[in-house]
Image (tube, grey):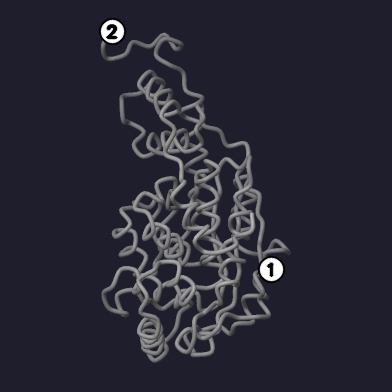
Amino acid sequence: MTLPDLATFARLIGDFPEADATALANWGRREPTLTKPAGSLGRLEDISRHMAAWQGHHPPRLARLQARVFAGNHGVAMRGVSAYPAAVTEQMVLNFHKGGAAINQLCQTFGIALSVDALSLARPTADFTLAPAMREDELREALDIGLAAAEPGIDLLILGEMGIANTTSAAALCLALFGGAAEEWTGRGTGIDDRQWQTKRDVVQAGVDAHPSKDPLRILQCLGGRELAAIVGAVAGARLRRIPVMLDGYVCTAAAATLQAMRADALDHCLVGHVSAEPGHRRLLQRLGKQPLLDLAMRLGEASGAALAAALVIAALACHNGMSTFAEAGVSDKDS
């Protein structure tokens, strides 16, 4: 679809479906019959339940795993908030297409299809300390791209991003949405030194001070980036089409938090693949009430943690769908 205005997108959020009660009931009937003590597979059981509920289908399936990486450039990069120049965004996109990045190896290993969307890299967003990062039409265009990425038939949508200086946007979004102090949300990103870290914190605070809106979409427009807005659109589109989502690290989760600020249950269909080494991510997950699947001190972005966590989804569904029941195996359960 093409969004005529932001009010239309807000109405879509209001139309989000709930978890499927029939699929949940069918999962609940099968899980206790499997040849194991109840709860003995821990969070793997939670994952299979989640997948059935949000696919609206039992048994849950994984015929099509799709990773989508959105890339964007940020005008605020000119403020010296990153250890790398903005040109690296485009260079890394080329590396993705050539198959040389970590995400390529992970997707190949776990049978995940990978698509990369480069969003107007030659036109960075505005420096958000001076002006809104995006015009409204630019925000709507990015949301549209994200909505279209949640294609019917995907069984799990794995989301990630690439964009020099986008941890600065993520920190500014979190500060604007949740309050606190800039230093609580601002990490070292690509590995900046102490001087750059102070600059980054100052930039985050200046951006929030320049745009004091309480409207989540307006905050996204003023402080976000095209790739963050595309993630917001993709998460929303996935919910509308009953596609479970695996979120990646800090930037990805910060973008998605825009939706939870609009509707408290907006991220119920989302799993979080890992907690990033970026300190703001752990704080953000606590605010969102989300428990990550992995904690491996990763901070690469590009959907790497989310793709790795997809292996747990594969394992969870293999167990739930493939294990024998007590009756099938001729094994006595605890009530026999």
Q: Residues within 10 Å of mark 2 (few under 14, many from 20)?
A: few
Task: Indicate the position of residue 121 as horizontal and vertical percent values.
Answer: 66, 76
Q: Is residue 43 left or right of residue 311?
A: left
Say which residue appears at 36% left-offset and 84% top-offset: 201
Rendered view: 74 above or below 286: below
Near-viewer residue (324 or 252): 252
Picture quadrant of residue 25: top left
Q: Between marks 1 and 2, how big is the CA–CA gap?
A: 58 Å
Question: Residue 208 lies in what quarter of the image?
Answer: bottom left
| Residue type beneath disc 2 | Ser
Mark 2 residue element: loop
Q: Position of residue 47 (x, y in %)?
A: 42, 39
Mark 1 and mark 2 lie on one chain; the one further toward the N terminus is 1
Left or right: 121 in relation to 194: right
Q: Quadrant of residue 172?
A: bottom left
- Considering the numbered disc 1 on the image, is that residue within a helix, a strand or a loop? helix
Above or below: residue 70 compared with residue 313: below
Residue that carries the numbered disc 2 in the rendered image? 336
Residue 105's disc is none
278 relative position to 2: left or right: left
Quadrant including the N terminus: bottom right
Q: Nearer the viewer, residue 7 or 151?
A: 7
Identify whether 124 is placed above or below 196.
above
What count of labels does the image hold?
2
Q: Nearer the viewer, residue 244 or 219?
A: 219
Counting from the top left corner in percent of width and height, residue 96 is at: 67, 64
Vertically, is 135 above or below 294?
Answer: below
Q: Amino acid at mark 1?
A: Asn
In x, y percent, where is residue 148? 63, 54
